Amino acid sequence: MGYSMRFTAVERQPLPPFWGSNPASRTSKSAVRQEILAESISCLGLGLIGRNSLPFNFILWTLHPYHIVMHIESTDCLIVIDVQNDFCPGGALEVPHGDEVVPVINSLLGKFAHEVMTQDWHPADHFSFASNHPGKSPFETTELDYGEQVLWPDHCVQGSYGAEFHPELKTTGAEMSLRKGYMKNIDSYSAFYENDRKTPTGLTGYLNSRGFQRVFLTGLATDFCVGYSAIDAAREGFEVYVIEDACRAIDLDGSLDRSKQDMHNAGVHMIDSTAL
Ligand code: VGL
Ligand code: ZN
């Protein structure tokens, strides 16, 4: 499935100069035609030449005088997942290049009218920690009541420095900050449901009662907390966009590819921050 952007929600901005000569001299009619063509091809479901594919994007970028950007609406909410010290380089469960999301997210914060941030927030005796399972090492798995669970190094312990937001993340504009993973016996990757997939965190109710329709996800880690949150958000009826360059992955045994496939199957859209 390709993008399902509504035409009305799309605006165009000139490309940077290296993309071609004088974009202002071209008509925006051609941009509209290009958009309609893109949408039509995408509707045909032709994976190889679909809207998100490399060949099509290449044609789009080389021939197209305008860069298509999405229009952010008042019913959109930016969700920043777990940008905490322990997931950044030097942290207890560091995500490679995790800190690189901070400037990207900071630049997006000014564009959205509404933002929610989440924090992984575990008690020290949390069941997802390998240290609480004698004989087990981090990154092994174990069977818990609700199924298989990866065992992690101790991380994001409530009140610790590692659980704090990255010091350069601009948090002041966030309208809500949600903590998750605070119950000893159950992990919570998703910002919507605990890992038993049944216990809600309350985020769906919050987003619905605020009237949000589309959610844009960023943060750490793509293949765990962002991915699970994106799939649950889609399941809850939101239109979901993961801003890929505002996320970084752990990538444990192919988990990034699996997560991307699962997101795709759930109807989650992957976009780049330059589209916003
Ligand atoms: C996360 C593993 C354990 C995440 C949280 O934020 O992606 N991953 N706890
Ligand atoms: Zn955790």
Image (cartoon, rainbow, N blue to C red):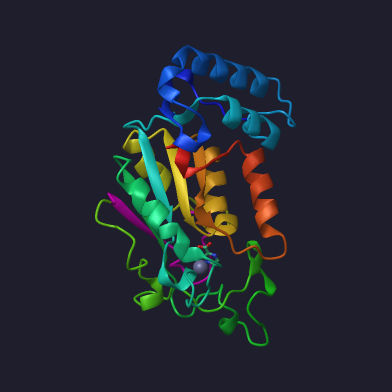
Classify residue 261 by image quadrant.
Answer: top right
The residue positioned 45% from the left and 14% from the top of the image is 27
| Residue 180 located within the stretch drawn in magenta | yes
Compared with residue 261, is residue 5 higher up or lower down, i.e. above or below?
above
Q: Does residue 246 appear anywhere in the picture?
A: yes
Q: Position of residue 237 (x, y in %)?
A: 50, 34
Q: Quadrant of the N terminus?
A: top right
Compared with residue 163, is residue 218 higher up or lower down, i.e. above or below?
above
The residue positioned farthest toward the front in the image shown: 21
Residue 241 appears left or right of 213: right
Q: Position of residue 24 (x, y in %)?
A: 40, 22
The residue positioned 52% from the left and 34% from the top of the image is 19
Task: Give the residues drawn in magenta, as a range.
Answer: 174-190
* Front in this rendered view, residue 199 or 100: 100
The residue positioned 52% from the left and 44% from the top of the image is 242
Classify residue 150 by image quadrant.
Answer: bottom right
Q: Main secondary structure of the magenta part?
A: loop
| Residue 230 located within the stretch drawn in magenta | no
Q: Position of residue 122 (x, y in %)?
A: 44, 71
Residue 148 appears left or right of 166: right
Q: Quadrant of the C terminus?
A: top left
